[in-house]
Image: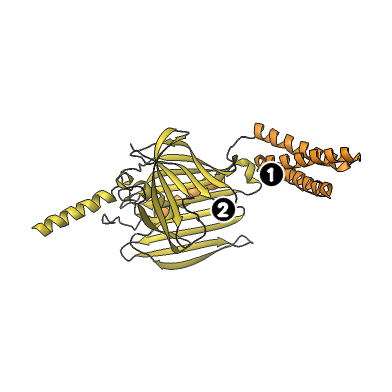
Chain colours: A yellow, B orange
């Protein structure tokens, strides 16, 4: 009897953790990405994060879409039109399909991951454009860990964590599939901080991000993310260290929130 | 010797300022503008002491003025607006339709 009770509690607990309580269908977050060199700010691109509902004949999924668009003044120099999307289970935010369709200054690349969670397998498709305009495909099967997600789904999954239960200094690892390789991202909770944003002064959870075994996100606590310390946990501000200066991501507007 | 060094530094800074002012990174040209201006002033002081005339000062100052006016003009009149996104929206639509087909055979498992 005791064993059954314990089993019931464990399954109930995992169910509670897995539930999506933060991300609503129809949510739209708009950001401005800028380059900051000792206080001299230059706007580079607009980043949008949107969610919507996608219905198939058998199921209803949530589409998480992120787009990056350079501002007009940059278009003649380096035009970016990126599209990242992930189709997830609306209740648990588990991804089923991921697509990355990027166009950056004449360079085009398309990546697609179709998840098979039962077999821990991802069917990956890479499409690139040659100089003459023709495309070529590359198919691959990638074995993944059960918890591996793509970058978009991870971003939304982080918002669904119970950060209010964490103590400053706590950290957690996430496995992210990017370019057919599994990368481990470590997220560390630093503490609460109140910052002023376009959508008002907010109390935020301050998190540090680092990528294991890579130089891309280097430095101690140099790449930071601020999530509002409320039920929505909106990412309002992010700061990334680059060789000269900082990259910044600031929120412009947030609509369609769940809570 | 010092004068030559200042001339070289002033010229490089002034050219960099003009180049930066033309690109969308015009905000950053403030730094080389200041460097070039200070160099120009120092060269001017040294030339006055030596009572010699230096043409390079004029060139440096002209470039500083060009870069500064471009930077100020851009910071006042340029707005951060996104360009044409028709192509992106089209790809967005195509991807959505394609995804719906791909997801047709997927059944959501509540365990995951």
| Residue located 54% across and 47% down the image | B88
Residue A105: image location, x then y, percent: 61, 52
Residue A232 visible to an observer of this rendering: yes
- Helix, strand or loop for disc 2: strand
| Residue located 66% across and 48% down the image | A77
Labels 2 and 1 positioned on one and the same chain: no
Compared to A187, does A213 lie above or below?
below
Residue B86: image location, x then y, percent: 56, 44
- Does the CB distance between marks 2 and 1 fall below 8 Å? no
A257 vs A7, nearest the viewer: A7
B60 vs A183, nearest the viewer: B60
Q: Residue furthest left?
A: A1
Q: Residue furthest right?
A: B52
Compared to A195, does A171 lie above or below?
below
> Closer to us: mark 2 or mark 1?
1
Residue A256 left/right relative to A15: right
Which residue is denoted by mark 1 in the rendering? B23
The chain letter for the residue carrying disc 2 is A
Residue A172 left/right relative to A7: right
- Helix, strand or loop for disc 1: loop
Residue A153 visible to an observer of this rendering: no
How far separated are the C-alphas under marks 2 and 1? Answer: 21 Å
Q: Quadrant of residue B30?
A: top right
Residue A62 left/right relative to A30: left
Residue A103 left/right relative to A197: right
The circle drawn on residue A103 is 2
Compared to B28, does A89 lie above or below?
below
The chain letter for the residue carrying disc 1 is B
Residue A220: image location, x then y, percent: 47, 53
Q: Quadrant of the C terminus of chain B?
A: bottom left
């Amino acid at each position: 009897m005791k064993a059954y009770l314990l089993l019931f509690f464990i399954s109930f607990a995992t169910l509670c953790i897995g539930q999506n309580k933060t991300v609503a269908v129809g949510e739209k977050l708009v950001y401005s990405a800028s380059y900051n060199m000792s206080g001299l700010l230059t706007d580079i691109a607009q980043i949008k994060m949107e969610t919507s509902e996608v219905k198939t004949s058998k199921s209803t999924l949530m589409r998480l879409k992120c787009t990056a668009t350079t501002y007009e003044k940059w278009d003649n120099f380096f035009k970016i039109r990126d599209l990242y999307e992930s189709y997830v289970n609306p209740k648990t935010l588990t991804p089923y399909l991921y697509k990355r369709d990027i166009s950056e200054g004449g360079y085009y690349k398309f990546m697609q991951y179709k998840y098979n969670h039962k077999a821990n397998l991802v069917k990956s498709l890479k499409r690139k454009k040659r100089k003459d305009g023709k495309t070529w495909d590359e198919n691959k099967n990638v074995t993944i860990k059960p918890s591996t997600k793509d970058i978009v789904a991870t971003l939304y999954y982080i918002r669904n964590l119970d950060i209010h239960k964490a103590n400053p200094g706590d950290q957690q690892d996430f496995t992210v599939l990017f370019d057919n390789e599994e990368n481990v991202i470590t997220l560390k909770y630093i503490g609460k901080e109140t910052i002023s944003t376009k959508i008002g002064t907010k109390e935020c959870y301050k998190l540090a991000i680092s990528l294991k075994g890579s130089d891309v996100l280097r430095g101690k606590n140099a790449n930071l993310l601020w999530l509002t310390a409320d039920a929505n946990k909106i990412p309002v501000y992010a700061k990334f260290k680059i060789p000269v200066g900082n990259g910044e991501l600031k929120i412009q507007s947030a609509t369609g929130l769940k809570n | 010797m010092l004068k030559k060094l200042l001339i070289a530094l002033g010229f490089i800074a002034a050219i960099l300022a003009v180049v930066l002012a033309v690109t969308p990174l015009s905000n950053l040209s403030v730094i080389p503008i200041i460097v070039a201006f200070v160099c120009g002033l120092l060269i001017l002081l040294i030339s006055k002491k030596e009572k010699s005339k230096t043409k390079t000062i004029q060139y440096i100052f002209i470039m500083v003025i060009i870069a500064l006016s471009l930077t100020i003009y851009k910071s006042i009149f340029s707005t951060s607006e996104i360009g044409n996104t028709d192509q992106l929206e089209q790809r967005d639509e195509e991807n959505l339709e394609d995804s719906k087909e791909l997801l047709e055979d997927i059944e959501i498992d509540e365990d995951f």
